[in-house]
Image: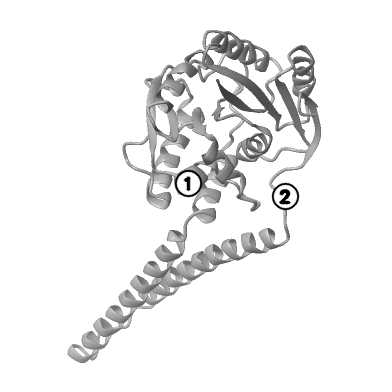
Amino acid sequence: MKKISFVIPCYRSAQTIGKVVEEIRTSMSRLSDRYCYELILVNDFPGDDTFEVIRKLAEEYDNITGINFARNFGQHAALMAGFHYCSGDITVCLDDDGQTPADEVGKLLDKLEEGYDVVYAKYTHKQHSAFRNFGSRVNELMTRFMLGKPKELYISSYFAARKFVIDEMVRYRNSYPYVIGLVLRTTKNIANVEVSHREREIGSSGYTLGKLFGLWFNGFTAFSIKPLRVATACGGFCAFAGFIYGVYTIIKKLINPIAPMGWSSTMAALVFIGGMLMLMLGLIGEYIGRIYISLNDAPQYVVREITGCKE
């Protein structure tokens, strides 16, 4: 009998996490002849009573572990913390708001049994807001360009992975974890399975515009050097354009000696090139800053308290 580890990052989900846990218990009771399971609930927002709800669930059920962060570290850090504590042959990650259908976990497990290493849920119709859908679209383009994700592969927060994939991800100790990048660099044997997507019943998404930008920036600076190559290409293009413009100016002056030299075009060229230089220097500085933080052993997360079966 295989063991399933459910890892759920929790963010202001005191009113929803109990329903998600109950739905998992109901779903897994139907699969009890094939699987046993455990739940790892990681509280990423210690400013409300979510962990008190998790503590009560851990006291009620002997296969639940609750992890409480010292502060908000983000969804991907919460997933990494859950990976460190899970012990299943298969790990399933899903959201805490009930939008990802826990009662359809059997579809992911069945697809994984076909021989795939990772299976992502693909939603037939997403019930997110227009803002979240836009963010998902940008993330899709970024992972395709920066991380080499196949065009046909759909990435979501609801997925199942084999133990060796999780073990490889746990080896990543740097300060900026990005789970999608870790999966894609571990295996390409990935599949999708269609599931439904529910409307959010309570609250709103914890992803703000700033958090989405931080997530995207982390993804393409932590797992790809393509931005630096793009910077090099832009620098080469600007240098070539400047050279061509200089040749054009000299020829124009030779053909028509009384032609006025353009002050506005000179300033435009200087402002453009100066802006490009500042942009490239900022990008290089971002990489150097992340190297500095990693060398200082900045933690991915800090656990304040653990409750439940792995306390």
* Location of residue 256 in the rendering, given as x and y in whole percent from the top left corner: 20, 88
The residue indicated by pointer 1 is 186
Q: Camera-side residue: 152 or 210?
A: 152
* Residue drawn 46% across the image and 61% down it: 225
Occupied quadrant, residue 121: top left
Q: Quadrant of the C terminus?
A: top right
* Residue drawn 55% across the image and 50% down it: 218
Inspect the image, locate mark 1, and give the three-letter code of the amino acid beneath it. Answer: Thr
Tell me the SS state at disc 1: helix
* Location of residue 286 in the rendering, given as x and y in whole percent from the top left corner: 58, 61
Q: Camera-side residue: 107 or 276?
A: 107
Assess disc 2: are there few (<14), some (14-19) or many (≥20) residues with their C-alpha within 10 Å of its C-alpha: some
* Location of residue 57 in the rendering, given as x and y in whole percent from the top left corner: 74, 15
Select label 1 or label 2 by which is in front.
1
Relative horizontal placement of residue 55, taking residue 20 as reference (left or right): right
Q: Sequence order check: which comes first, mark 1 or mark 2?
A: 1
Give the number of the disc on residue 299. Answer: 2
Inspect the image, locate mark 2, and give the three-letter code of the amino acid beneath it. Answer: Pro
Asked if labels 2 and 1 touch by Cβ distance under 8 angstroms, the answer is no
* Location of residue 109 in the rendering, given as x and y in whole percent from the top left corner: 46, 22
> Vertical placement of 93 versus 71: above or below?
above
Tell me the SS state at disc 2: loop
